[in-house]
């Protein structure tokens, strides 16, 4: 009886102790699982997905200035309510374009694709765009934590059309991905992405 009680208490205590001792490694592992990006390479167009325009525009600008492409397409038709409240009723694609132009990307190099209210819808719009324009190599820029889900959404159906897709992650401007637990924004971002990842897998 004593041994059974000791095991009953001891095993959970041991597990909790291990979780505490290795908590940082486990939390970094949770972040690393979400980050699934490619190395950049030459592409015909970079697509900047909607959301987080500052960080994604910064990454797209870096790729553009390094010569990986000569054209950037900003996607998304959502109108963020925070900007509407400030009298700036613009689609997310327009916000990304403004961020790019502030980083000295010429207007002639930027195209708006004001379609899509989700990653899935944007992928459909981008696929149609690529087929219409006869593109066969593109890069997709999204936030670091989004890259696994973006890969799951894009890779297979684009491969079926012989379109090479590289997924590029943009570092957050609000938190460090490898220390996401130190900031509320990081906690929310990681939690939201796991919820979305599970939703997309089930859907």
Image (spheres, rainbow, N blue to C red):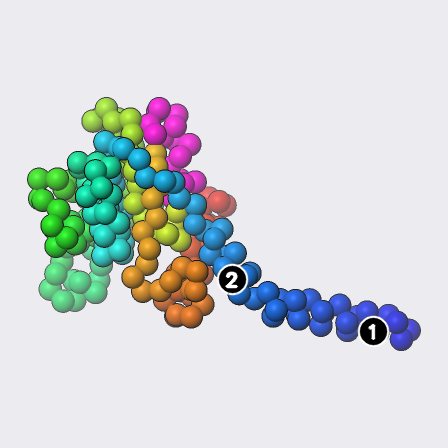
**Is 4 one of the magenta-colored residues?**
no
Task: Kindly identify which numbered label has been placed on residue 6.
Answer: 1
- Indicate left or right for 129 with 22 as reference: left
Residue 197, image x, y percentages: 45, 50
Q: Residue at x 8, y 44 (%)?
A: 107
Residue shown at the point (30%, 41%) measured from the top left: 140
Q: Is residue 41 above or below residue 83?
A: above
Instruction: Estimate how packed mark 1 is, as few (under 14), some (14 to 19) or many (20 or more) residues with alpha carbons within 10 Å.
Output: few
Q: Is residue 173 above or below residue 16?
A: above
SS at mark 2 in the image: helix
Q: Which residue: 11% across, 50% down?
A: 104
Whole-angstrom CA distance, mark 1 to mark 2, is 30 Å
Q: Quadrant of residue 65?
A: top left
The quarter of the image holding the N terminus is bottom right
Q: Is residue 107 left or right of residue 4?
A: left
Residue marked by disc 2 = 27
Looking at the rendered image, the disc whose residue lies closer to the viewer, 1 or 2, is 2
């Amino acid at each position: 009886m004593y041994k059974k009680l000791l095991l009953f208490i001891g095993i959970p205590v041991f597990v909790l102790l291990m979780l505490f001792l290795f908590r940082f490694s486990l939390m970094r592992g949770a972040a690393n699982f979400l980050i699934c990006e490619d190395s950049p390479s030459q592409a015909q167009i970079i697509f900047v997905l909607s959301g987080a325009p500052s960080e994604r525009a910064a990454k797209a600008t870096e790729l553009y200035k390094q010569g990986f492409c000569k054209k950037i397409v900003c996607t998304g038709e959502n109108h963020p309510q925070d900007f509407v409240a400030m009298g700036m009723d613009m689609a997310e694609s327009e916000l990304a374009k403004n961020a790019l132009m502030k980083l000295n990307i010429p207007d002639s190099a930027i195209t708006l694709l004001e379609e899509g209210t989700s990653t899935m819808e944007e992928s459909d719009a981008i696929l149609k765009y690529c087929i219409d324009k006869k593109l066969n190599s593109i890069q997709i820029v999204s936030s670091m934590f989004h890259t696994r889900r973006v890969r799951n959404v894009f890779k297979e159906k684009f491969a079926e059309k012989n379109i090479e897709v590289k997924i590029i992650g943009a570092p957050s401007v609000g938190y460090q991905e490898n220390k996401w637990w130190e900031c509320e924004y990081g906690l929310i971002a990681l939690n939201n992405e796991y919820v979305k990842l599970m939703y997309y897998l089930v859907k």
